[in-house]
Amino acid sequence: MRRLALLSCVAAMPALATPALATGLEIEIAGEAEGTVVIDLLEDVAPRHVERITTLAEEGAYDGVVFHRVIDGFMAQTGDVEFGRRGGDMSMAGRGSSELPDLPAEFSDIPFDRGVVGMARAQDPDSANSQFFIMFEPGPFLDGQYTIVGRVTEGMEVVDAIKRGAGQNGAVIGQPDVMERVTVTGDPEG
């Protein structure tokens, strides 16, 4: 098992699908936060990571996965398809990945602003797999260090309502919020 963590005590995540068809995600969230978050995926910026996220979403791998690490004023992390399932052992959440291989970094010059979605990874820049995070506030210390895969275009108020974690690591105690269903949205013209 490996422990995923952002350089400043948080982690980032990966993606997978058919970039020509995958333009976004709709995430139905339940818990303290209730509602739908729409994410515009940036296929031109991080094609391999977007492909990964969309592949996992199309397989239903993200359905029922919790937000296991949530740091107020920073970000909400989810996507541990191995250990982060609702009803699982939350002490392991954040350490897992998918059965697919890790991805090489696809860094860009896009800043980590509010609503930006980045891939979680371990210390190795080429270790992103399935976990991702959504920024509550700008995090310029992440710029050029983590792969950006998208940005929230609707439902940021839902993201803002996600149950916060405790301590420096932001581990969620008790019942975490969950991604009930994650759907890939296609190009309406494609």
Image: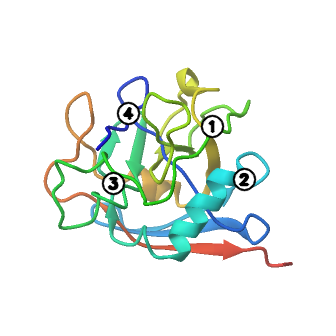
The residue at the point 71 percent across, 68 percent down is 18
Residue at image mark 4: 5
Q: Earlier in the sequence, mark 3 or mark 1?
A: 3
Q: Secondary structure at mark 1?
A: loop
Tag 1 and tag 2, C-beta contact below 8 Å: no
> Which sits earlier in the primary sequence, circle 1 or circle 4?
4
Q: Label 1 neighbourhood size at 10 Å, few (<14), some (14-19), many (20+)?
A: many
Circle 3 residue: 67
Q: Position of residue 99 (x, y in %)?
A: 43, 60
**Image check: 177 left or right of 48?**
left
Please rate how many residues cluster around mark 2, counting C-alpha atoms within 10 Å: few if below 14, some from 14 to 19, many from 20.
some
Q: Earlier in the sequence, mark 3 or mark 2?
A: 2
Give the labeled residue for mark 2. 47
Measure the C-alpha gap from mark 3 to mark 1: 23 Å
Measure the alpha-carbon separation of dots 1 and 4. 15 Å
**Displayed quadrant of residue 144:** top right
User: Is there a contact, CB below 8 Å, between mark 3 and mark 4?
Assistant: no
